[in-house]
Amino acid sequence: MTEQAKGCQDKEMTFRIMRYDPDKDAKPYFQQYKIKLQHGMTILDALMHIKETQDPTLSYRKSCRMGICGSCAMQVNGFPRLTCQTQVTEISTDTIEVRPLANYPIIRDLVPDLGDFMARHESILPYIIREDHQEQNNPTGEYSQSPAELEEYLQFAYCIKCGSCLAACPTNATDRKFTGPQALAAAYRYAADSRDGGLAARLDTLDHPNSLFRCHYAGACSEACPKGVDPSLGIQLLKRKLFQKKILGRGQKPAGMAQTPAGIGRREGIPQAPEKTV
Amino acid sequence: MAEITTHDLLILGSGLAGLRAALSASIASSGKIDIGLVSKVQLMRSHSVAAEGGTAAMLRPEEGDSFDLHAWDTVKGSDFLADQDVVHRFVRAAPGEIMQLEHWGIPWSRRPDGRIDQRAFGGHGYPRATFAADKTGFFEMQCLFDTLTRYQNTTRYDEWYVTSILVEDNQFRGLTAFDLATGEFHVMLAKALIIATGGAGRMSGFTTYSHAVTGDGIAMAYRAGVAVKDLEFIQFHPTGLIPTGILMTEACRGEGGYLRNADGNRFMERYAAGLMELAPRDIVSRSMITEIKEGRGFKGQNGLDYVHLDLRHLGADKINERLGFIRELAMKFVDVDPVHEPIPVRPVFHYTMGGIGTDIDGKTNVEGMWAAGEAACVSLHGANRLGTNSTAECLVWGKITGEEAAKFVAGFEGEPKHPDGAVARSRSELFDGLLGRDGGESVYKIRADLRRNVDENLGVYRIEEELQKGVEKMAELKDRYKKITIRDRSKAYNIDLMYALELGCMLDLAEVAFIGALRRQESRGGHARLDYTARDDENWLKHTVAHWTPDGPELSYSDVTIDTWKPVERKY
């Protein structure tokens, strides 16, 4: 426990939380709650504490509570954060304001509607595209991929689809048709995968006025991403891929099958299964 | 009137098993089958994303691995309660799943020569844990979710909470559900159902599970007349982070990490000198609790005494490459950097070995209904699951049940029938029953008491008087549940109502687990009794089978399939 955290134990905090019930409220409003801070309390813990002890009508999303499922991103003091991995003590104000993620319609209280976000992800064809269809659904071995080839796209595969990047993106705030940093980074993730040969199929979606070249490189997405993905870098790298494909006509030849090197022997110390005894 | 939607196949749950089943049924029917994929969470939020360490499969026969060795490891790990025909089928199907996900784009960690890498895991005689850094489940989910977007025959019902499974004349008919966003009540009809809703771990207060893992599918199948099996077998993972229970993957030890007691000693030497920290989980967890009980642990808050998981000798590079998420979690949640300090851990409620009873194809005793993954009990894990066999099971039986259900749908004549009586009953249970109650009891207080009861009386070590106390407490909690008041009366996104329904599911399943544990007078795998310390093959080499009755579970027992290896003493 840090000294700062110890000092905060039992401190009273005020949460200013945005409330909205579509059946009752013409527009969202704020409600205040006071709670005693406990050691290790995250913003999500605080919301759960409020719901369970003060106001059972408060609604939010939660699931894994360990920063991997992407359910609980919200605006905390105006910045998108995964509330389950944000300690209350990380926020230095005495009053903490929690709102639903910006730039999305609100379903209720702190619950945003991510339907359109998911649709944008799907629009860039987020899967490996190859011509060997029979092999791809009926594998006879493994496609080769070296650790260095894996590194090319791995960080862009860390996206948990929490929606924070679109909440932070100034382009998305003004142009809802923008493909957005999440989907564009996902497009790069697949285009940069040595097993993929599908950039041509994605060209129409990407080379479009509301897509790849609509980004003004504010970098807000990369700052907001709670998982260390750098979508703005992905967007720049994707531009290069697109340029190479469209202007230079250079595409990627998808990886072939990995071969088992000759002369591999049994490892030491591997036991044998016992003989049948029935 | 409720709105009615109709599909060929409904899949309940969108984790690994559910997504794999959707893909399998789509491919098996060449994209013709009309699937409704129903989940109380959005896609990619299922608990499967939290699986960290790996997926077991025999990939390298030339290096000494074999189907028989994987099968033997699984059978011995299960303390001989696994059905051996099921195990043989499993080990032969698992490698295909690794290749399939590889072909669909998963970032498996690789060897320098471009082939898939594998690492060591507890109880496995060959290092066959196929992994994608320490986010294996997350990447598997991403791979299946993304690949499923290729197929246009699946309609997603994200954030629909299913309230009952409709069965008439022992035939599956449909589901009732409400759409969380709008609060509207719906009837969903179909020819077939695959249940893939995961385990029931949130019945415990100290658990690795996501908040959403409340056993809904198992409980609803149980209430609909499906037999549930072996629910007393609960896996405690040795390394839950103090105090949240967040999983510190077994790969920490697979990569060479140590467990140390308060004296700094690698205590596993006393309990499993051969495999040390890589003994199966039930053994390591019992050893840790023994160390703590005998005073060689560290004192923690709220009784959460602990030992140390020490990774320091692995070095920063290996930790960053192979266990980066673990480092991030330890730093974010307890301010401990594993590169420089040991991690505080203790055994934590991690897996439900039991579940919906199925045959080897994942089919239940109700016509048209299958179950896959942790929700199911196909009897692969017996009394104790080996690490990395669960994600593999989700994939293998996701595929099998998807194909079987697609076959069944293709041969189904006519249209799904609307079961008037069952729908009316479900509707009345929800609106007049649950929402009509007003006894003033709090969902959250009963839930907290349930978790305390499970943690205190159904732990790593069990004993008659505690189990008896637990059973009595369950009766009291179920009685109080009849007097709850749901205080949120809004229609839109009413999670107060959802939590109440989830609590009902957990109460039903915890009751079965307690009664099964009380009856089983032996120690086997995840069920360790202080008053019956030995395994008793003569009387207890059998599965517990529970059927729902209005007066509580009715227990019977069924045989274990032993077609290859007779039970022997389990030493590591």
Image: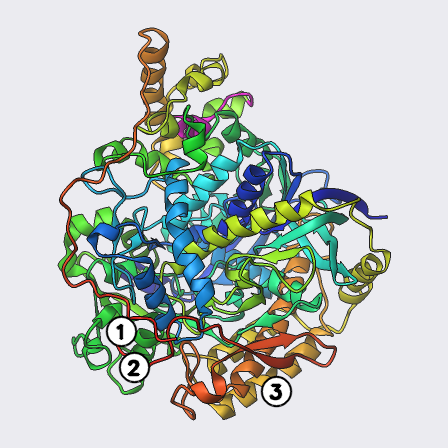
Q: Which residues are magenta?
A: A176-187
Distance from disc 2 to disc 3, alpha carbons, whole Å, reads 28 Å
Near mark 3 (Cα within 10 A), the count class, few <14, some 14-19 or many ≥20, is: some
The answer to whether residue A106 is above or below residue A62 is above
Tell me residue A171's x, y (percent): 47, 22
Residue ID for mark 3:
B472
Q: Nearer the viewer, residue B410 or B129?
A: B410
The amino acid type found where label 3 is placed reads: Glu
Residue B132: percent from left, percent from top: 32, 46
> Mark 3: which secondary structure?
helix
For the residue pair B412 and A241, the one nearer the viewer reads as B412
Same-chain check, marks 1 and 3: yes
Per the image, label 2 sits on a secondary structure element best described as helix
Q: Where does label 2 land, which residue?
A: B292
Camera sees residue A274: yes
Residue B570, above or below B40: below
The numbered mark at residue B242 is: none
Q: Kindly indicate whether the residue at mark 1 contacts the one at mark 2 (C-beta within 8 angstroms).
A: yes
Helix, strand or loop at label 1? It is: strand
The answer for which chain carries disc 3 is: B
Vertical position of residue B173 compared to residue B277: above or below: above
